[in-house]
Image: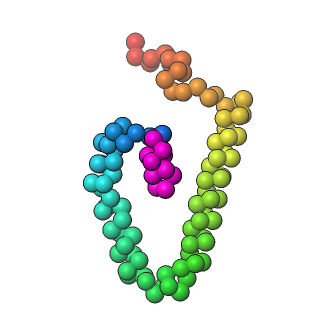
Amino acid sequence: MLIFFGLLQTGIIEAEKIQFFATQFIQYMPIVFLPVCVGIIEYGDIIQTFGIKLLIIGITATFTTLTLVAVIANKAMDDPSTNNQSINNSPKQPSDHA
């Protein structure tokens, strides 16, 4: 969100171009954040006890997942044995219907 805010402030992204999506995001924001808030309230004592450890685990898991996906995607795109054509550009298959 901070990066997005910076892009809006510098004018790289114009607010008018994302008005519709921002409105939709704001409309559905409670669906995203209410369960998290309830969980924080419900398990506040656990978060107080293990908060830093949970934060480190969450950041590490996110970074590991993103890195793994990037490496796999990079290898798949560089592998000449894979067909990198999009579905729309693939040759038409003959129809079984005659």
One can see residue 4 in this view:
no
Region rendered in magenta: 1-11
Instruction: Identify which residue, 49 or 80, lies in the foreground.
Output: 49
Please say whether residue 80 is one of the residues in the magenta stretch. no
Residue 74 horizontal/vertical position (percent): 68, 40
Looking at the image, which residue sits at the far front? Answer: 10
4 sits to left or right of 67: left
- Tell me, yes or no, whether the highlighted magenta stretch contains residue 9: yes
User: Which image quarter is the C terminus in?
Assistant: top left
Count all numbered tags in the image, as a single digit: 0
Q: Position of residue 3 (x, y in %)?
A: 51, 52
Q: Main secondary structure of the magenta part?
A: helix
Q: Residue at x 61, y 53 (%)?
A: 66
Q: In this view, does 5 lie above or below 17?
A: below
Give above or below for 41 relative to 30: below
Tell me residue 36's x, y (percent): 39, 70
Quadrant hosting residue 76 = top right
Q: Which residue is drawn at 42% across and 82% down?
A: 43
- 74 left or right of 96 in image: right
